């Protein structure tokens, strides 16, 4: 019998498909990585309904905004009972702010906290947050330990390999973080200097996995397919994988991973009808949170849906400009009627990443 193209590596074939992370038992080892501006409540919920998603994390939330309960931060941490398991990601260069934000999350019934040490953006790094924290191991440990000591919630850290190729600090940090009680580490296999350029360094992620004793290491970066995810697990030895842009391009990736791993079957492409239902569901969930403002918020997804669903260009353009819920449904009716007019294709660069020299981000 021929081997299916996405066969499970021997090292993964026998493992428990669930994973315990900070005391939470997660049903899958494949997580949604945060993509600020995209992975909001509506998108997370729609994706969870497709199946196979082990854990989602909110967009990064500035600690001071959370403490002051700014409108924007309340939108970012908005959740529902269906939006579980969920981790809230916070950032700040100021310990007291992170500690207060952690208290706020605990007091408001959230399950887990992630500290962002990976963000390459200058405005975040200049405040001492994001990837900047990776440059000072003892300082980073002081910050993380203060948060761990302040709350009973599990605290994880998301980081990059280091500031640049000369300063690969992730293994040393991961080891130190484990000693002070961090629940898990997510590592994006690029340095801050790389931004989103070049390729993910799987050996770099492996070095992080090898540096820790037992806490889960979640590999991240450039996973676009089931094969990519399995390869990341196999090559790096990581315990789980966080998928960001690949999940935007293919929200069915988690369902397919479950299919391949649990049932030993090949991944399947969703039907045209399933794709349209997902589009409708995503928008409908958005309106539950944002009412008519969803028409504006949804526009940035037009290009992605246009590609994925093979929406004729004139209708994709209308999705970029529609102004009412009725108009959305009118467009969807036409999308259904005109299915097959344009080929569906895989969008590889629909999600904007910062451009130009990383120093100027
Ligand atoms: C538009 C965009 C927004 C992002 N927002 C966040 C964020 O809020 N928090 C975070 O830790 N990482 C953020 N990231 C980084 C991703 O979580 C992830 O580490 C990175 O995109 C590599 O994984 P991928 O190739 O699977 O997307 C963002 C990335 C992009 C492209």
Image: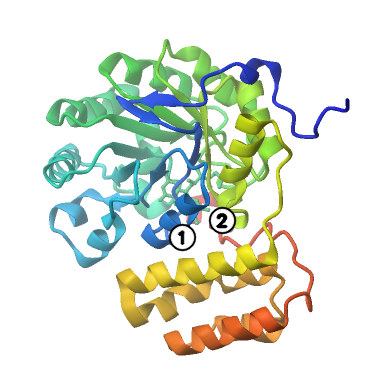
Q: Is residue 39 visible?
A: no
Q: Position of residue 206 (x, y in %)?
A: 58, 20
When asked about the image quadrant of residue 200, the answer is top right
Q: Residue furthest top?
A: 213
When the figure is inspected, residue 267 is found, relative to residue 340, above or below; the finding is above
Residue 336: give its label. Answer: none
Mark 2 and 1 residues: CB-CB less than 8 Å, in contact?
A: yes
**Can residue 194 be spotted in the picture?**
yes
Residue at the image position 43 percent from the left and 51 percent from the top: 121
Is disc 1 placed on a helix, strand or loop?
loop
Colouring style: rainbow
Apparent side of residue 276 relative to residue 110 in the rendered image (left or right): right
> Within the image, what quadrant is residue 337 found in?
bottom right
Q: Residue 192: x and y, percent? A: 50, 40
Q: Position of residue 313 (x, y in %)?
A: 70, 82
Q: Which residue is mark 1?
A: 38
The numbered dot on residue 248 is 2
Any atom of ligand 1 within 8 Å of the CB at mark 2?
yes
């Amino acid at each position: 019998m021929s081997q299916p193209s996405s066969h499970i590596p021997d090292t993964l074939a026998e493992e428990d498909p669930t994973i315990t992370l900070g005391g939470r038992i997660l049903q899958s080892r494949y997580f949604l990585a945060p993509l600020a501006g995209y992975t909001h409540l509506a998108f997370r919920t729609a994706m969870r309904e497709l199946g196979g998603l082990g854990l989602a994390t909110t967009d990064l939330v500035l600690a001071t905004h959370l403490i002051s309960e700014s409108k924007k931060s309340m939108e970012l941490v908005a959740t529902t009972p269906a939006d579980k398991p969920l981790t809230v990601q916070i950032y700040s260069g100021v310990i007291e702010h992170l500690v207060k934000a952690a208290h706020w999350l605990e007091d408001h019934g959230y399950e887990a906290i992630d500290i962002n040490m990976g963000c390459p953006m200058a405005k975040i790094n200049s405040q001492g947050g994001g990837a900047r924290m990776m440059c000072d191991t003892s300082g980073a440990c002081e910050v993380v330990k203060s948060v761990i000591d302040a709350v009973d919630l599990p605290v994880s850290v998301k980081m990059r390999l280091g500031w640049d190729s000369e300063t690969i600090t992730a293994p040393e940090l991961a080891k130190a973080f484990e000693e002070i009680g961090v629940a898990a580490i997510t590592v994006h296999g690029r340095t801050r200097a790389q931004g989103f350029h070049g390729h993910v360094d799987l050996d770099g992620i492996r070095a992080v996995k090898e540096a820790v004793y037992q806490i889960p290491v979640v590999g991240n970066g450039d996973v676009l397919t089931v094969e990519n995810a399995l390869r990341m697990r196999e090559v790096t030895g990581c315990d789980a994988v966080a998928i960001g842009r690949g999940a935007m391009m293919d929200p069915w990736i988690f369902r397919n991973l479950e299919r391949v791993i649990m049932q030993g079957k090949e991944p399947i492409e969703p039907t045209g009808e399933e794709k349209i239902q997902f589009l409708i569901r995503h928008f409908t969930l958005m309106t539950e949170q944002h009412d008519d403002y969803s028409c504006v918020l949804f526009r940035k997804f037009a290009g992605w849906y246009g590609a994925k669903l093979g929406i004729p260009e004139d209708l994709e353009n209308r999705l970029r400009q529609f102004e009412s819920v009725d108009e959305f449904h009118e467009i969807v009716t036409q999308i259904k009627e005109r299915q097959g007019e344009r080929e569906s294709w895989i969008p590889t660069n629909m999600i904007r990443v910062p451009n130009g020299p990383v120093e100027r981000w």
